[in-house]
Image (spheres, rainbow, N blue to C red):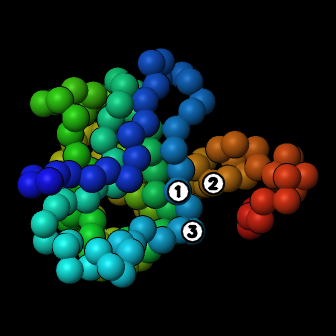
Amino acid sequence: MQKQKNVITAQGRTDPNQNTGICIENSRVMAAEDLAPELSSFKTFLGRPWREYSRTVFLQTYLDRLIDPAGWLEWKDDFALQTLYYGEFKNLGPRASTRDRVKWRGFHSITSSTEASKFTVENFIGGRSWLPGTGIPFIP
């Protein structure tokens, strides 16, 4: 499909006090090998708002060259660009630089480990208390 745009996440909250969001930590965002020749045919973004208070954070994640340098995509004109929270912390790879990222008020290039820790598995979803019982591996 010409001019198709792909997004990795589309998160939404209806209330800024809701304790929800998407946090992608210590992961890899890469295209499948068979798609490598097609990367120039479409743009891929880390996310776009679904509701007014969208919240998504990528932490210490490898971002391959398929990610557009802007990083994030608007949804409908300027919808939610002032109320969303999009963050990136110590990502790695060819598209980890935030230099050419969107300039929205809600985008945050996180530099503080204290701020970033709010979005870890342990703190964001209380993973230490219930994940071990599921058998899902994680590093607290």
Q: Amino acid at mark 1?
A: Ile
Q: Residue furthest left?
A: 2
- Write down the residue under mark 2: 120
Of callouts 1 and 2, the N-terminal one: 1
In the image, 45: left or right of 57?
left
- Write down the residue under mark 3: 26
Q: Residue at left 13%, top 66%?
A: 41
Q: In this rendering, does residue 109 appear at all?
A: yes
Q: Position of residue 121 (x, y in %)?
A: 67, 53
* Distance from the alpha carbon under mark 1 to that under mark 2: 9 Å
Q: Residue at left 37%, top 25%?
A: 51
Comparing 103 with 131, the one in front is 131
Comparing 94 with 35, the one in front is 35
3 vs 2, front mark:
3
Secondary structure beneath dot 1 equals strand
Comparing 112 with 99, the one in front is 99
Comparing 92 with 10, the one in front is 10
Image quadrant assignment for residue 42? bottom left
Q: Position of residue 74 (x, y in %)?
A: 20, 39
Q: Answer above or below: position of 81 versus 37.
A: above
Q: Amino acid at mark 3?
A: Asn
- Write down the residue under mark 1: 24
In the image, 97: left or right of 125?
left
In the image, 44: left or right of 9?
left
Secondary structure beneath dot 2 equals loop
Q: Position of residue 134 (x, y in %)?
A: 85, 52
